[in-house]
Image: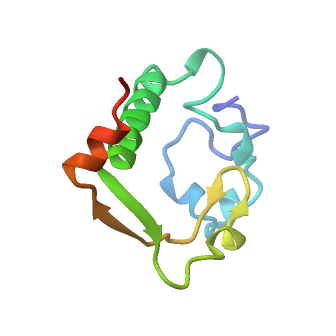
Amino acid sequence: MYHHADHFAHPEEFHPERWLGEDPRFAHDRKEAFEPFSHGSRNCLGKNLAYAEMRTIMARMLFNFDMRLAEGYETWAHGIEIHNLYEKPPLFIHLTPRDEAERARLRPN
């Protein structure tokens, strides 16, 4: 699909400007046909490792910090647009380090 002329103009050539949406030569490209890291036999080999690392980082963040939204970001989720991927506005939060007693309380027995 990535190299088929029905989907892309000049499919065998490298043209980074095709993804910028400014070049009229590539206005009719079917960009939704290009999914290099998420489907089929070309699935990303490192995707599961990346997910595991993200879960570990998030768990460490939740364990070590109290988090609260910065002022003015209470309605942050209303600015999210969903296309092929989520298009999210910036989110600012305040991190307050937890003390050792609070971290000990959160540890599993």
Image coordinates of residue 14 in percent, x first then y, are: 48, 44
Q: Residue 107: x percent and y percent?
A: 33, 33
Q: Front-most of 105 and 36?
A: 105
Q: Nearer the viewer, residue 42 or 101?
A: 101
Above or below: residue 21 compared with residue 65: below
The residue sitting at 66% across, 76% down in the picture is 75
Quarter of the rendering containing residue 41: top right
Where the C terminus falls, by quadrant?
top left
Q: Residue furthest bottom?
A: 72
Residue at point 75%, 47% (across, down):
30
Please name whichever residue, 16 or 33, is drawn nearer the observer in this view of the structure.
33
Where does residue 20 sit, x and y in percent of width and height? 57, 63
Q: Residue at x 41, y 62 (%)?
A: 67
Q: Is residue 76 above or below residue 56?
A: below
Residue 38 occupies which quadrant of the picture? top right
Which residue shows up at 71% across the image and 50% down it? 84
Q: Against 91, is 14 above or below?
A: above
In what quadrant of the picture does the N terminus appear? top right
Left or right placement of residue 55 versus residue 79 in this view: left
Count of numbered badges drawn on the protein: 0
